[in-house]
Image (spheres, rainbow, N blue to C red):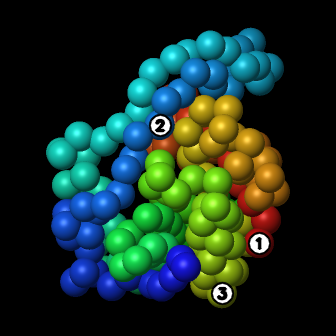
Amino acid sequence: MVQYRELCGEEICRELFGGFIRHQNVTKCRRRVDGEWVIRDDPFVDDWTEEEYQLLVKCLKNTAAAGGFVYGAFYDGVLKGFTSVESALFGGEQRYLDLSCIHVSEDMRGKRIGRALFLAAKDWAAGHGGRKLYISAHSAVETQAFYRAMGCVEAEVYHQGHVEAEPYDCQLECAL
């Protein structure tokens, strides 16, 4: 049985991710070409290096320390999914809150963990003054299908920092 709970900064460390498998085989991606969204072959493997795990830990600790939301899914006491939402509103009247990450371990995908994490992020954001979640989303077709199933659409206003950091991501929003 999967258990869900908010994570505090003190428990966020590299060891927390010892049973988490980021691995994703990507074959097709959603890309904007000449103003239109298309599906393109773009095979690659997405995985995290040790340095990327260390950066993730630092970012999640910062999110928690700044009053944001860090929430985990545990199976047999092992972290198998997590999400985070930043605490600062942006986007003017859009009142976006940034869904800075959501990931499910490769061995637990397809078990509705991502859905539960996303809904928890939406609930938290709605309770903290947001009108919409903002998502700079991986362009893999599977990832895009998940976000579409969650009710996400293309963002009305793009966050330039996200666009510059991840130019192939799809900038999405979800009404709360």
Local secondary structure at mark 2: strand
Q: Could you tell me residue 125's position as x and y percent?
A: 63, 77
* For discs 3 and 2, the disc positioned in front in the rendered view: 2
- Mark 1 packing: few (<14 Cα in 10 Å), some, or many (20+)? some
Q: Could you tell me residue 97's position as x and y percent?
A: 59, 67
- Of labels 2 and 1, earlier in sequence is 2
* For discs 2 and 1, the disc positioned in front in the rendered view: 2
Residue at image x 18%, y 46%? 50
- Closest to the observer, 51 or 66: 51
Vertical arrangement, residue 20 with respect to residue 162, above or below: below
Look at mark 1 in the image and give the residue it sits on. 176
Mark 2–mark 1 distance (CA, rounded to whole Å):
29 Å
- Closest to the observer, 29 or 154: 29
Please identify the quadrant where the N terminus is shown. bottom right
- Closest to the observer, 112 or 51: 112
Tell me, yes or no, if residue 90 can be seen here.
no
Local secondary structure at mark 1: loop
- Of labels 1 and 3, earlier in sequence is 3
- Mark 3 packing: few (<14 Cα in 10 Å), some, or many (20+)? few
Please identify the quadrant where the C terminus is shown. bottom right
- Mark 2 packing: few (<14 Cα in 10 Å), some, or many (20+)? some
Look at mark 2 in the image and give the residue it sits on. 24
Look at mark 3 in the image and give the residue it sits on. 127
Residue at image x 47%, y 64%? 81
| Residue type at the position of mark 1 | Leu
